[in-house]
Image (spheres, rainbow, N blue to C red):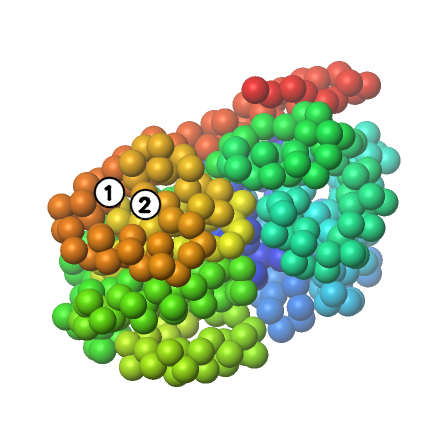
Amino acid sequence: MRILHVIPSLDPAEGGPSFAVKAMAEALVNEGVEVTIATTAGAQNAPVICDGLSVIGEESLPENASTERRGYRVVSFRREFEPYKISFGLARWLGHNVTKFDLIHIHALFSFSSTMAARIARKKNVPYIVRPLGVLNRWGMQNRRRLLKRLSLASVERRILTHASAIHYTTKAESDEASSLGDWLAKLPSFVIPLPIEMAETSLSSSGEFVVRFPEAAGKRIILFLSRIDKKKGIELLFAAFKKIRAEFPDAILVIAGQGSEGYETKLREEARRLEISDAVLWAGFLADEQKIAALAAATIFVLPSYSENFGIAAAEALAAGKACILSDQVGLAYEARSADAAIVAECNADQLASAIMALLSDRFRREELGENAEKFALENLSMSKIGNQLKEIYQQVVDSSVTKRRIKVC
């Protein structure tokens, strides 16, 4: 099979979606699927880019317009307009190339790339699947451009979703939240397949590398937040909880690993000063690859207190690393992890969060038990081989369905 993934951005600064689609592509390549990712980028952010002005087909792309990454191909197009990541080059390329693929997997909604990919695929009679990336949940619909999203959902996204062969949710919680938007959405064909996680081994040497880079963490109980810095991540909740924790555990340190808007990071730093915890908050910045592994290895506890998370790729990575994790009840993956006794789940409440963290800091045996369960859970449910095989099976069902009846029903 030849599969095309379309996503607005692969920039790591965009958070989990950019990592997820690359992991999915690699998992599919391992299953013998031919994968291409089409995306957009700002001129300064894309190492591989073309303007699309003369794109007729793949053979006409400029030499520097595509690249190979672990067996899959990436084609990146320059944006003409940053809001909604509009790229006319991408639209032209899709118009000339979608028929070369057996199926299109569209990632995101309320985006130029998803709108154009769905429209062109429908026009060219190419089946497509949509992964909403959690934008259909309550928090996203109510807190991010609420009125505009409601109007767009009724006039644009509803059409995209109703013509899709299926909707790809990554957790049951994401599926349930989306279904609450209306019976029309609940009745559409859908399936739940989580995101694949590459099992990265953590070790004492890795944790030592973190302390070498951040000597202020030496000898401390490390509470790690590792995710995109955004209002929905519940960092203010974590700060309020940490103020209580410090009274009981003066050797605790809170590591904030990630990046976000400069204005919001400044606001958070001011909040830390107001709470008088600045001296015990370590701002590690964006961490990737070995640096991320080192941070996870050094962490005593991983915490993700998000107000909204359709999946929680940072949580999945922490689980795969065998860390004792505390997740908010709004993290999609939390329910599955709790069922396997692989994580502690707390409400989005500073007092409850503080109590959960202090309980784990006090109980090394429980931390070790959770870590072992977490690693087992990730291996059994989130491995590249398992997810790659599940996606391939779904793709095959879609491709094998008739031209006039593309929709599938998956339990």
Q: Which mark is residue 370?
A: 1
Q: Nearer the viewer, residue 29 or 385?
A: 385
Q: Is residue 156 above or below residue 255?
A: above
Q: Position of residue 254 (x, y in %)?
A: 31, 69
Q: Position of residue 265 (x, y in %)?
A: 49, 76
Q: Residues within 10 Å of mark 2 (few under 14, many from 20)?
A: many
Q: Is residue 52 visible?
A: no
Q: Is residue 270 visible?
A: yes
Could you say whether the residue bearing mark 1 is in a helix, strand or loop? helix
Could you say whether the residue bearing mark 2 is in a helix, strand or loop? strand
Q: Quadrant of residue 89?
A: bottom right
Mark in the foreground, 1 or 2: 2
Q: Which mark is residue 344?
A: 2
Q: Position of residue 230 (x, y in %)?
A: 53, 65
Q: Quadrant of the C terminus?
A: top right
Q: Nearer the viewer, residue 70 or 345?
A: 345
Q: Residues within 10 Å of mark 1 (few under 14, many from 20)?
A: many
Amino acid under disc 2: Ile
Q: Nearer the viewer, residue 181 or 135?
A: 181
Amino acid under disc 1: Leu
Q: Quadrant of the N terminus?
A: top right
